[in-house]
Image (spheres, rainbow, N blue to C red):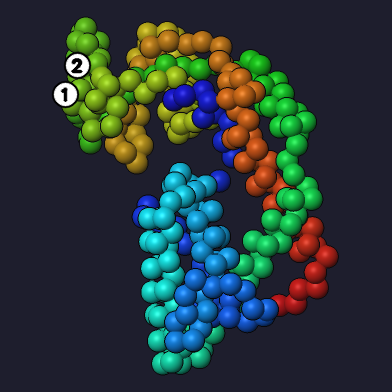
Amino acid sequence: MSVSKFFKGFAAVVVLTACAPAAYAQGKTTASFAKVNGVAIPESLLDQNVRINVSQGAKDSPELRQVIKEELITREVLAQEASKKKLDKTPDAQEQFAQLRQTFLIELLLADYFKNNPVTDAEIKADYDRQIAAMADAKQYRLSLIVVKTEDEAKNLLARLRKGEPFSKLATEKSIDPSKKDGGNVGWVMPGQILPVISNVMVNLNKGSLAAAPIQTPAGWNIIKVEDVRPFQAPTLEESRENIRQMITQQKRIDFAKKLRAAAKVTE
C-alpha cells in the first residue's frame, strides 16, 4: 500500500454538460451554430462543452468541435421529440425534474460557498501536522496472508508452515486471496487499515512470526505472518496534500449543511 494513499477521508468520446432541453432558447439572443426546428443552439453551449473536454485531456480541434456539434444537435432533436410527446408532463417526469433542479441548485450553492471559503494551504498544513502527531508512536506491519475456505484446510497449511514449507509457495498454490499472485504479500499495513479480528492478532506478533491459529473472516480462514515491523513511515506534505484537501472539503460541506439545517424550520 503506497504511503501517499494513507491520508484519505470522496469514457466517453466526448463529455457533455447536462442541460434542460431548450432552456438555452430563453433569454437574450446569442450567436448559434445550428437551429433545430427553429430552436437555436448557442455557440456558448458548444464552447462550454469544448472546455470540459479539454480539461479532461482532449485537444481542442475542428474534429472535436464537430463531434460535439453533432451530439448537441442530436440531443436537441431527441429532447424536442420527447417534449412533443409530452413525456415531460407526467408526474414521474416532474418529480425527476424537481430532483435535477434541486441537485443543480445544491451544486451552485456549494460552488459559491467554496469560492468564498476555499481550503487554504494553512488548513492543509495544520491537518497534516495533526495527523502526523497522532501517528507518532504508530507502527506498520509487512503482512503476508493465506486465505482458504475451510478451517481444516487452514490448520493443515499452518502445520506445513511450521514444518518449514515456504509461506510464499503455499500462498501461491493454495490461497484464494488476490495476494496469492505475490506469494501472499499484502505489503505494509497499519492496524486501522485491516479487519480488527486480524489486526488484533497482528499487533501481538514479532517479526517473522506466524499467528498461532487460523482467523475466520467473511473471506474465509486466514493464516497470517508478520514479515517485518517498522515505525510508521509518514508521507510528505506534498504527497498528502490533495487527499487532505479532499477530506477538508468534505468536512466543510458537512459543516455547512449542518449549519443551514440547524437554522431551518423543519416539520415532520
Closer to us: 150 or 93: 93
Q: Residue at x 71, y 61 (%)?
A: 109
Tell me whether the residue at label 1 lies in contact with that at label 2, contact meaning CB atoms closer than 8 angstroms: yes
The residue singled out by tag 1 in the image is 173
SS at mark 1? helix
Q: Which residue is drawn at 80% across and 69% down?
A: 264
Residues at marks 1 and 2, CA–CA distance in whole angstroms: 6 Å
x then y, percent, for residue 34 = 47, 75
**Of the numbered discs in the image, which one, if any, rests on residue 75?**
none
The residue singled out by tag 2 in the image is 169
Q: Residue at x 51, y 23 (%)?
A: 3
SS at mark 2? helix
Q: What residue type is disc 2 on?
A: Lys
Question: Can I make out residue 220 in this image?
Answer: yes
Toward which corner of the image does residue 215 lie, by quadrant? Answer: top left
In the image, is residue 127 above or below residue 98?
A: above
